[in-house]
Amino acid sequence: MIARMNAHDHIETLSGKKALYRVYNDVRFSKDKTPYNPRFAGRLSRATASRRGGYYFWIKPGESRVGCGFTYPNADDLKRIRQDIDQNYSDWRKLLKSKAIVSNFGMMMGEKVKTAPKGFPKDHNAIDLLQYKQYWFEHHFSDDEVLAKDFVTKVDKIFKSIRPFFDYISEVLTTDLNGESVI
């Protein structure tokens, strides 16, 4: 998977071993004392500060999925993303309605603030986008799809379809409001 991804993106995760999440459950504060996580999961990181976003995978019978996006952007990045939404919300809507994203992921998901974020009016034309605190996409798979010979090819195609979104956000997060590089 890493080799396939590096054909169209720059992945800094060098091996599958580095990509995998640990198999042990932290049972210290949990009522469920099961020692192992009943899933195979991991993350592939995009290389360098100029490429933002990440790819995730969970393989578990009946609950397999891949995800990608920005789960918890830091405060400065979140502010910069919201500034871009404020100024370019029609570009955001067009990007989020692209055929590749809609057919592979449906709608963007993630945590939202309940009202308007600080500094933005409640009646903003893009309040639905400004409320996001996470920018996340998921695609779910059946067990038969996971076991199919072309599963890795399918996942690679799905991950590749999010690249326009990643490239757009990377551009936003590496420039200031005037379009000047900040890296």
Image (tube, helix red, strand yellow):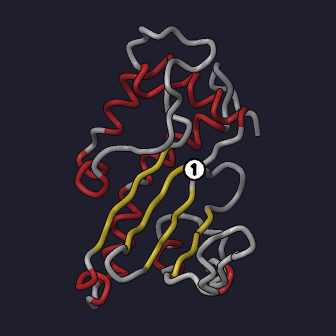
Foreground residue, 155 or 51?
Answer: 155
Say which quarter of the image contains residue 81: top right
* Quadrant of the snapshot with the C terminus: top right
Picture layout, residue 130 above or below residue 170? above
The amino acid beneath tag 1 is: Thr
Against 168, residue 29 (above or below) is below
Confirm whether residue 15 shows in the render.
no
Identify the residue under disc 1.
71
Q: Is residue 127 visible?
A: yes
| Nearer the observer, 71 or 149 | 71
Residue extending furthest toward the front: 31
Q: Is residue 180 left or right of residue 42?
A: right
Mark 1, residues whose alpha carbon is within 10 Å: few (<14), some, or many (≥20)? some
Residue at position x 48%, y 72% from top? 57
Q: Position of residue 115 (x, y in %)?
A: 50, 20
Residue 141 coordinates in the image, percent (x, y): 29, 72
In this rendering, position of residue 35 left or right of residue 101: right
